[in-house]
Image (cartoon, rainbow, N blue to C red):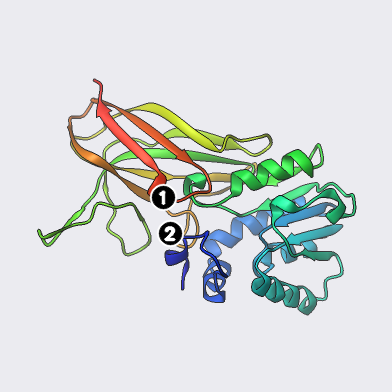
Amino acid sequence: MTSRIEYNNPVAIGALGLPYHYEMVSDAVRVAPFKKAIQAVSKGKVVIESGCGTGIMSILAAKAGAKMVYAIEIDPKIADFAQNNFERNGLKNVKLLRKSTLDVTLDDLGGQRPQVIIAENLSTWQATEPEVQVMNHMNKTLADQKCVRLPMTVQNTLELAGTKFMFENIVELRTHFFEFSGIKKPKILSKPIVFSTFDFNGQVATSYDKSIEVKVSAPGIINSLRLTSPLELIKGVKFKSSDSLMPPVIVPLKEDLKVKKGNVVRVQIRYNTNTDWERFQASARIVK
């Protein structure tokens, strides 16, 4: 069981499994920017981490000099694993909260408002993970007025794409998929354009029904969208994607569009965050 499987069904009942977490902690492309940001902002602060998993980021915060770290993990098996890691590192400034982040109250934090929030409940466009809901809850009920959020912002971008959906001229498989290594990349027919920006310093909408116009940069057949979510953890510390976290997602369109360079395509997207890709609705038509 790996992130390549679980990414498609992160809300399945049961633990994600240690092989999944092994892939995440061993992914230096993912861990390095979070480590840099955590070490820059944690000293002397009250820190809270949503969904701590193995505990790696809470441990980094504690070792960076955090006054206190509250590590939240709802999965009992992985929570035990995290607790063992806290004890192995001899940390006295970490407390494990075995519950959903959405149920955490100030009483759980001893009345202390967190000055740093670490929330790596991330997925591309937040389509399959509860990042928005988690951040909204913590901002509304827990966060200190000058709290630092990791991540700070996420930009959801899209590109028009032409993707191979026919194989061996006998099987057509028109489905969304994740651009992991080894997967053939689509032909890109537009420059990336920002569909939405999630600024986690405030409340963020959880559902979207919006159209956007995209200019075609190369001729071809548009049959899909390529979605990405580059984020900024703190100012100057950025993350785009890795093979275990937030890979580009290719979403098929119902109909092919034959386009020329300079055409304008109106893309309509409707979806809720923290649901699944099967419910993500996208359509497109040429308007110029």
Identify which residue is drawn at 62% across, 44% down.
Answer: 133
Image position, residue 101 (x, y; %): 70, 54
**How many neighbours does mark 2 have within 10 angstroms: few (below 14), some (14-19), or many (20 or more)?**
some
User: Between 237 and 45, which is closer to the camera in this rendering?
Assistant: 45
Residue to which mark 2 is pinned? 8
Location of residue 260 (image quadrant)? top left
Q: Say what amino acid the circle numbered 1 marks.
A: Trp
Question: Can I make out residue 11 in this image?
Answer: yes
Q: Is residue 83 above or below residue 115?
A: below
- Looking at marks 1 and 2 on the same chain, the residue that comes earlier in the sequence is marked by 2
Question: Can I make out residue 64 in this image?
Answer: no
Image position, residue 191 (x, y; %): 34, 35
- Seen in the image, is 252 located left or right of residue 13? left
Location of residue 210 (image quadrant)? top left
User: Between 92 and 211, which is closer to the camera in this rendering?
Assistant: 211
- Mark 2 lies on a secondary structure that is loop
Identify which residue is drawn at 87% across, 57% down.
Answer: 67
Image position, residue 147 (x, y; %): 77, 42
Q: Say what amino acid the circle numbered 2 marks.
A: Asn
- Mark 1 lies on a secondary structure that is helix
Asked if disc 1 and disc 2 are in contact, CB closer than 8 Å, the reply is yes
Residue to which mark 1 is pinned? 277
User: Between 228 and 277, which is closer to the camera in this rendering?
Assistant: 277
- Seen in the image, is 64 located left or right of residue 202? right
* Badge count: 2
